[in-house]
């Protein structure tokens, strides 16, 4: 069961009246210039908060585990043993 082919003689084109199209003017896109201060600000706002949290966590870990009977070594001892 296949679809029967349409003969070209049976197909008619319907003419459409040509209408004038509305012309839309696009504004030119403003190019951004290289702004090192903006890039540095965005980079700092992305990198500084996680770095501060990591430093605070390491300080808390160092204070909590610096006693001789602590079950975990402080990060300074782990760093010295690793390197």
Image (cartoon, rainbow, N blue to C red):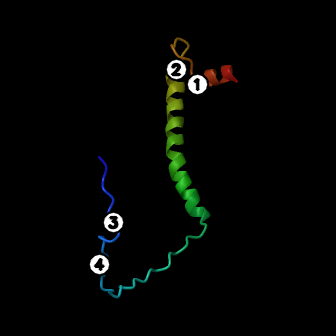
Circle 4 residue: 14
Which of marks 2 and 4 precedes in the sequence?
4
Where residue 66 sits: x, y (%)? Answer: 55, 20
Which of marks 1 and 4 precedes in the sequence?
4
Circle 3 residue: 7
The secondary element bearing badge 1 is classed as helix
Say which of marks 3 and 2 sits in front: 3
The reply to whether the C-beta atoms of the residues labelled 1 and 2 are less than 8 Å apart is: yes
Which of marks 2 and 1 precedes in the sequence?
2
Where residue 31 sits: x, y (%)? Answer: 55, 73
The image quadrant of residue 40 is bottom right
Q: Which mark is residue 65?
A: 2
Cα separation between marks 4 and 3: 17 Å
Circle 1 residue: 75
Say which of marks 1 and 3 sits in front: 3
Q: Which mark is residue 43?
A: none
């Amino acid at each position: 069961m296949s679809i029967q082919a349409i003969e070209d003689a049976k197909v008619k084109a319907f003419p459409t009246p040509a209408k004038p199209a509305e012309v839309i003017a696009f504004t030119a896109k403003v190019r951004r210039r290289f702004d090192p201060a903006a890039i540095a600000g965005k980079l700092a706002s992305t990198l500084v908060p996680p770095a501060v949290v990591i430093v605070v966590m390491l300080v808390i870990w160092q204070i909590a585990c610096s006693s001789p009977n602590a079950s975990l070594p402080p990060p300074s001892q782990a760093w010295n043993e690793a390197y």
